[in-house]
Image (spheres, grey):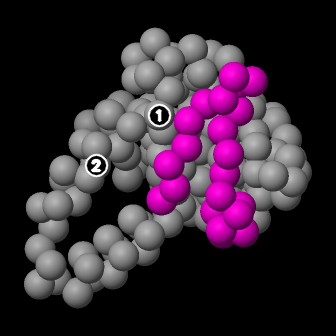
């Protein structure tokens, strides 16, 4: 389970350190293979390989006769790149993913249950503010799902 948010920097080669708490969990529970891919919100998702495999299994059940399913699969899976945690605790984010998410130097690394998200720091603060500004509406919508 990944929780919390951390300030980090990404270098010109796309290398970014993973917070030690997340790194330890990945190595302990999942080995070190991960998948880095486009998110649905102009950030980058980082999934441990076993969790990603479960998503792929579900994706295989989408009907190819559905045009929106095909388009989603194309976009989501073409934006994936394999990586691993190096001896310095870093992963490499592919250039096309850095461009997609607008990652330059300052990034936020966010724990989000079964995956990690990497955000451009300014985009994260803007997104967080939007969420906070709409908190009542979001809470009402989520309450219908029975979480709180």
Q: Which residue is painted at 37% across and 52% down in the image? A: 141
The quadrant in which residue 110 appears is: top right
Q: Looking at the image, do the residues carrying marks 1 and 2 touch, with CB atoms under 8 Å apart?
A: no
Q: Which residue is mark 1?
A: 33
Q: CA distance from mark 1 to mark 2?
A: 15 Å
Q: At which x and y percent is residue 63? A: 11, 74
- Whether residue 16 is situated above or below residue 31 in the rendered picture: below
Q: Earlier in the sequence, mark 1 or mark 2?
A: 1
Q: Is residue 97 magenta?
A: yes
Q: Is residue 46 left or right of residue 118?
A: left
Viewer-proximal residue among 81 and 134: 81
Q: At which x and y percent is residue 43? A: 62, 57
Q: At which x and y percent is residue 103? A: 77, 58
Q: Secondary structure at mark 2?
A: helix
Q: Which mark is residue 55?
A: 2
Q: Is residue 58 left or right of residue 10?
A: left
Viewer-proximal residue among 105 and 1: 105
Q: Answer whether residue 63 is visible to the viewer in this image.
A: yes
- Whether residue 145 is situated above or below residue 63 in the rendered picture: above
Front disc: 1 or 2: 1
Q: Secondary structure at mark 1?
A: strand
**Span colored in magenta:** 80-100
Number of labels in the image equals 2
Q: Which mark is residue 103?
A: none
- Whether residue 126 is situated above or below residue 76 in the rendered picture: above
Locate the N terminus by quadrant: top left
The quadrant in which residue 22 appears is: top right
Q: Is residue 111 left or right of residue 86?
A: left
Q: Which residue is painted at 28% across and 43% down in the image? A: 53
């Amino acid at each position: 389970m990944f929780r919390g948010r951390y300030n980090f920097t990404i270098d010109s080669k796309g290398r970014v350190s993973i917070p030690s708490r997340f790194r330890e969990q990945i190595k302990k529970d999942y080995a070190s293979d991960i998948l880095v891919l486009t998110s649905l919100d102009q950030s980058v998702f980082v999934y441990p390989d076993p969790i990603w495999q479960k998503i792929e299994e579900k994706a295989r059940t989408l009907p190819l006769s559905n045009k929106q399913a095909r388009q989603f699969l194309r976009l989501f899976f073409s934006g994936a790149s394999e990586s691993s945690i190096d001896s310095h605790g870093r992963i490499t984010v592919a250039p096309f993913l850095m461009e997609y998410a607008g990652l330059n130097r300052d990034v936020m690394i966010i724990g989000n249950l079964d995956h990690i998200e990497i955000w451009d720091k300014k985009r994260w603060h803007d997104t967080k503010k939007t969420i906070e500004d709409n908190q009542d509406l979001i809470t009402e919508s989520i309450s219908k799902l029975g979480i709180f």
